[in-house]
Amino acid sequence: MKESGRKQGASSPCAACKLLRRRCAQDCVFAPYFPADEPQKFANVHKVFGASNINKMLQELPLHQRGDAVSSMVYEANARVRDPVYGCVGAISSLQQQIDALQTQLAMAQAEVVHLRVRQSASFSHHGFGPASPSNSGSPAFKLMGSQTKPIFDMDMVVDQASLGESMWSC
């Protein structure tokens, strides 16, 4: 974050004052957060919040919190420009959907590992091979699993079998 929107000794106004077509005073509340070389930053925030509302919000905050407030306003304004209806809530919702899909995939993979272990264990004991060892199978996954003395995953989560599909559970 730049400390000042204007260069020392220069009379170049900050991005806010330039957009608002006003003289940029020495104590301009916008100057530290909206430098002249980032005009789009203030333009988006101004479009969403309005200059007087931004000014009021910044005036009411202590100096040490203003930078974070401006960052939040810029983020929300940019999200509103991209998605005028949902703004950053749309972005959050999209990320939440991705998390849900990835958690489902992880649960399915964990269930498949358990299913394969049970199936392979039953197969070895049924054919009289005794305890499974990495040399008993040519499967790279079995070699990886067999080389560990304790389970890879602790199954402490409940998996909804209907969402996993019936094909995974049939042998």
Image (cartoon, rainbow, N blue to C red):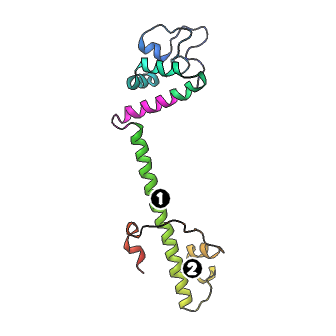
Asked whether 79 falls inside the magenta stretch, the response is yes
Mark 2: few/some/many CA within 10 Å (<14, 14-19, 20+): few
Of the numbered discs 1 and 2, the one sitting upstream in the chain is 1
Residue in view at x 42 percent, y 76 percent: 169
Q: In front: 3, or 57? A: 57
Q: Which residues are magenta?
A: 70-86
The residue singled out by tag 2 in the image is 138
Q: In front: 112, or 50? A: 50
> Mark 1: which amino acid?
Gln
Horizontal and vertical percent for residue 65? Answer: 57, 26
Left or right relative to 44: residue 144: right
The residue singled out by tag 1 in the image is 103
Horizontal and vertical percent for residue 36? Answer: 51, 17
Up the image or down, 136 lies above or below 55; here it is: below
Which quarter of the rendered picture does the C terminus lie within? bottom left
Residue in view at x 46 percent, y 25 percent: 41
Horizontal and vertical percent for residue 170? Answer: 40, 79
Horizontal and vertical percent for residue 131? Answer: 62, 85
Residue in view at x 46 percent, y 53 percent: 99
